[in-house]
Each structure stands twice: as C-alpha cells, then as structure tokens.
Amino acid sequence: MSDAWLVAVLLPLLWIGVIAAIGVLSGWRRLGMRYREERPFQGKLWRFQSGRMRWGMGYNNCLTVGADGLGLHLSLLFLFRVGHPPLFVRWQDMTVAPVKWLFIRGCRIEFPFEPGLSLSISERLADRLSAEAGPAWPR
C-alpha cells in the first residue's frame, strides 16, 4: 500500500471526523434534532457570514443565514455540512440580546428549548435579520 493511497483515504476521513465533532461540540447537531429544516428556504439569504456557538466554536465565513417573517435559516457551505443539517428556527423559539466583545458589538441568539446553546453574530447581520423578520423579531 503506497503512502499516497493512505493519505487519499485517511485525509477525507479525518476531515469528516473533525467537522462532525465540531457539530457536536458547538451544539449544532442538538439544534438539528429539534430544528432541522424540512423545506427549501424561500426568504432572504446572506452567504459567507460568521458566527460563534458553544465553547467558542467559530463558523467564520462559512454560514448561510436567512430570515423571513416566520424564522431564521442557518446552513453551512457544503464542505462543512457533515453533522450540520440546515436549520430553521421560528422567531418565537429564540431570544435575542445585544452583546459586546471588546470594541465589537453583536447579538446573541439563544434557544430556550435547548438550554446552553446560543449563536453570536455581528450587529450588522442582526440588523439585517431584524429588518426581514419585521414585527416577529424577538425582543
């Protein structure tokens, strides 16, 4: 067995394992059990966004975030999708609070039905989501 063949097999398996582990550690997988998206999302989408979840698990420039009058859509670029099903969370199933990290303002979205899980996003992205959600935006 050549080293090239071994690398060609083990590297993808390692990638899949790491990405799936991040899905578990961040809490995305747990959210997926409750909020897995069942239909194609039809609202406004913003690609290549960033966010941070439990235990500092960062999703930098790989999030697709969407909003409509019913709720929040979250998905990842296809290379990072293992263990990260697309999510759709209704606005009434979350709370939103402003946060500040050093000099950066942001927003923390918490999921009361899944205690301990949250998603922190930029203030700019939160403003976009709020505009699309309209009066349904959690206060």
Image: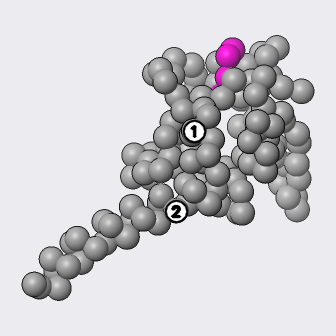
Residue 122 seen = no
User: What residue sits 78% from the left and 23% below the top?
Assistant: 92
Circle 1 SS class: helix
Which span is picked out in magenta?
69-73
Instruction: Describe the element under mark 2 as helix, strand or loop.
Output: helix
Main SS, magenta residues: strand
Q: Quadrant of residue 49?
A: top right
Measure the alpha-carbon separation of dots 2 and 1: 16 Å
Q: Amino acid at mark 1?
A: Met
Question: For mark 2, what is the residue?
Answer: 21
Left or right: 25 in relation to 7: right
In the displayed orientation, state which residue is furthest to the left. Answer: 1
Q: Is residue 76 visible?
A: yes
Question: Which residue in the protein does label 1 denote?
Answer: 33
Q: Nearer the viewer, residue 21 or 50?
A: 21
Q: Could you tell me residue 111's position as x and y percent?
A: 76, 38
Q: Residue 48: percent from the left, percent from the top?
A: 54, 44
Q: Amino acid at mark 2?
A: Ala
Instruction: Judge by depth and name the residue closer to the eye, 99 or 40.
Output: 40
Crowdedness near tag 1: few (<14), some (14–19) or many (≥20) residues, C-alpha within 10 Å = few
Residue 85 appears at what percent x and percent y?
49, 40
User: 50 or 85: which is nearer to us?
Assistant: 85
Q: What colouring style does the render use?
A: one colour
* Residue 45 coordinates in the image, percent (x, y): 56, 28
Task: Determine the residue positioned at 39% across, 46% down.
Answer: 78
Q: Of the residues under marks 2 and 1, which one precedes in the sequence? A: 2
Quadrant the C terminus occupies? top right
